[in-house]
Image (cartoon, rainbow, N blue to C red):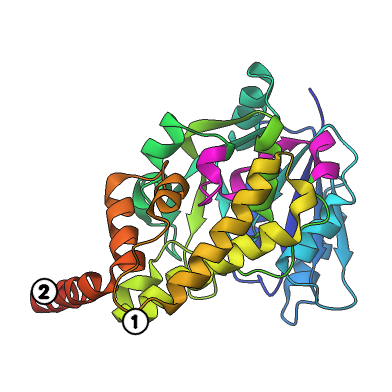
Amino acid sequence: MEKVDILLATYNGENYIKEQLDSILNQTYTDFRLLISDDMSTDGTYKILKDYEKKDERITVFKQEKNLGVVSNFEFLLSKVQNKYYAFSDQDDIWNNDKLEKTISKLESENADLVFTDLEVVDNNKNTIYKSYWKLKEFKDKIIKYNSFEALYLNNYVTGCTIVAKADTIKKCLPLPKTSKFVLHDYWIALIISQSGKIVFLEEPTIKYRQHKNNKVGSKKKSETMNFKDIRKMFIDVKKEHFQVFIENENKFENEEVKELNKKALSYYEKLEKTKIINFSNWNLFFKLYKYENKKYILENFLILNVPIIAGPLISLRSILKGMKK
């Protein structure tokens, strides 16, 4: 067996960390190191980690002297990787006991650089909310049909806590971007590796993905409780930030055409920001960017971004009808 470094970033996770640690330590694939970096927790997390460290020699705990934030904390852990593979872990999930065994087997059998999987969404008490995160987020068809750099370019579908990857990919991904709430470490790593590397997927959940009020990234759709003006602003702001990060880190992109597309895309969303009624220009760019999305997503985004005069009343009507059903 090849050894793997499991990277677990923690912060105020005392409520769920024991279950996650137990699920990792009870993996059927046992040849691993568990590297944990605590980001200045103010609850009992660090004590729990140290107690576990004393009980199992596979665990190494680091304590940060200042709060780094989740991306920098994972970057710190990436700098500690010594083995052939690394895996990301969140503090509040629960791994299926064969998670590592199945993902490493998939990685090796397909000679891939990175593997990711589906997730089962559960509540605080581990009750199933959704059997498939991919179906919930409408990722599944896209992943199965495309799964490529081009398909990842506009929207991420790789959930970091399911990733296992080869350690020799780390150098090309670092440093991680730290200026965005939307381009996080998992997306960035999957995107950069997918340019010239091979990413594969396991079409089954390997993790219970716990949803609770303290989740940094969850399964709920924020737009469901927003009015049209705020929805449109959010759509534009997210993509502006997305492509701004790409431009700021253009040395990580291997293709000159992609570097140029990053600039065109940012300009396009900046123009949309000023559009109040209808935008008639750069529709070809829109369809190039959204080529790998499903038809429903394309239509919804096209109307919201390019034809707000029509999309606004439609979304308002939809919200009214939903309210009448409750």
Q: Which residue, given by chain and number where applicable, does mark 2 sit on?
A: 321
Quadrant where the image shows the N terminus: top right
Quadrant where the image shows the C terminus: bottom left
- In the image, which residues are magenta? 150-172
Q: Is residue 26 visible?
A: no
Q: Which residue, given by chain and number where applicable, does mark 1 sit on?
A: 229
The answer to if 152 sits in the magenta stretch is yes
Looking at the image, residue 81 lies above or below residue 111 = below
Q: Position of residue 263 (x, y in %)?
A: 63, 58
Q: In this rendering, would 20 be left or right of 318?
A: right
The residue lying at 19 percent from left, 76 percent from top is 319
Q: Residues within 10 Å of mark 2 (few under 14, many from 20)?
A: few
Q: Nearer the viewer, residue 19 or 103?
A: 103
User: Which one is closest to the eye, mark 1 or mark 2?
Assistant: 1
Q: In this rendering, would 316 be left or right of 286?
A: left
Residue type, numbered disc 1: Lys
Residue that protrudes farthest toward the front in the picture: 281
- Cα separation between marks 1 and 2: 18 Å
Q: Residues within 10 Å of mark 1 (few under 14, many from 20)?
A: few
Residue 81 tag number:
none
Q: Position of residue 281 (x, y in %)?
A: 39, 60
Q: Is label 1 in a helix, a strand or a loop? A: helix
Q: Position of residue 295 (x, y in %)?
A: 28, 46
Q: Is label 2 in a helix, a strand or a loop? A: helix
Looking at the image, residue 211 lies above or below residue 5 = below
Which one is earlier in the sequence, the residue at label 1 or at label 2?
1
